[in-house]
Image: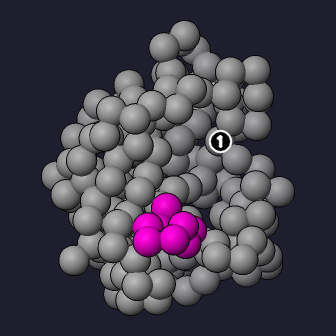
Amino acid sequence: MDTTRAGELSYRDATEADVEELVPLIESAYRGDSSRTGWTTEADILEGQRTDPDGVRKVITTPGSRLLTVERDGVIVACCQLEHRGDAAYFGMFAVRPGLQGGGLGKEIIAEAERTAREDWGVTEMHMSVISVRDELIAWYERRGYRRTGELTPFPYGDERFGIPQREDLAFELLVKELV
């Protein structure tokens, strides 16, 4: 079924019953050959896993954290993590099915995530960490109103839970957007 422009999107918090479906979605958006169908692939800079069932389950079950699941016509097409951190929310684990990327779905989802964080938690900023060498992805977020902070966190080299780096210059950069 082509879900590119079928029914409207619906949003709900993921449950532990969704873990089995969400892990392959997240993996397909970032790693391996399937990720090359979309434009958010990290396949050239990281091999191995992006997440695992325990990591997804932790996002779902940790207080102040939620995994927003996006469905179209009863099929999960995307997800994103929202975590309440005081006056800010953290946005992460953003995945859109590779074959659906590039059609405006991501813009809709991030706008809904920002609205949800602002209305549910009263936060004034959205934070995210992006691998600093992902210029195209960072530019996409900048077009959505995020700004680079220059604040870098080292990539966890040697911890294969985050993937196997294919280069030695990886770090996470904090991006911030004011939510007004």
x and y, in percent, of residue 174 in the image = 41, 43
Residue 58 locus on image (x, y percent): 77, 64
Give the mark count.
Answer: 1
**Label 1 SS:** loop
Q: Nearer the viewer, residue 155 or 103?
A: 155
* Percent x, y of residue 97: 48, 58
- Residue 177 lies in what quarter of the image? bottom left
The range drawn in magenta is: 83-90
Give the camera-side residue of 32 and 86: 86
Res 178 quadrant in image: bottom left
Q: In the figure, is residue 60 to the left or right of 82?
A: right
Side of 36 relative to 67 (left or right): left
**Closer to the camera, 123 or 45?**
123
- Magenta highlight: main SS: strand
Q: On screen, 74 above or below 173?
A: below
Residue at image mark 1: 50
Residue drawn 44% across and 67% down?
88
Q: Residue at x 61, y 20 (%)?
A: 165
Front residue of this view, candidates 4 and 101: 101
Residue projecting furthest to the right: 54
Q: Does 87 lie within the magenta span?
A: yes
Question: Is residue 68 on the magenta stretch?
Answer: no
Which amino acid, by three-letter code, is at mark 1?
Arg
Whether residue 67 sits left or right of residue 72 in the image: it is right
**Above or below: residue 37 compared with residue 157:** below
Image coords of residue 167 (percent x, y): 53, 12
What residue is at 44 percent from the left and 52 percent from the top? 128
| Quadrant of image for the C terminus | bottom left
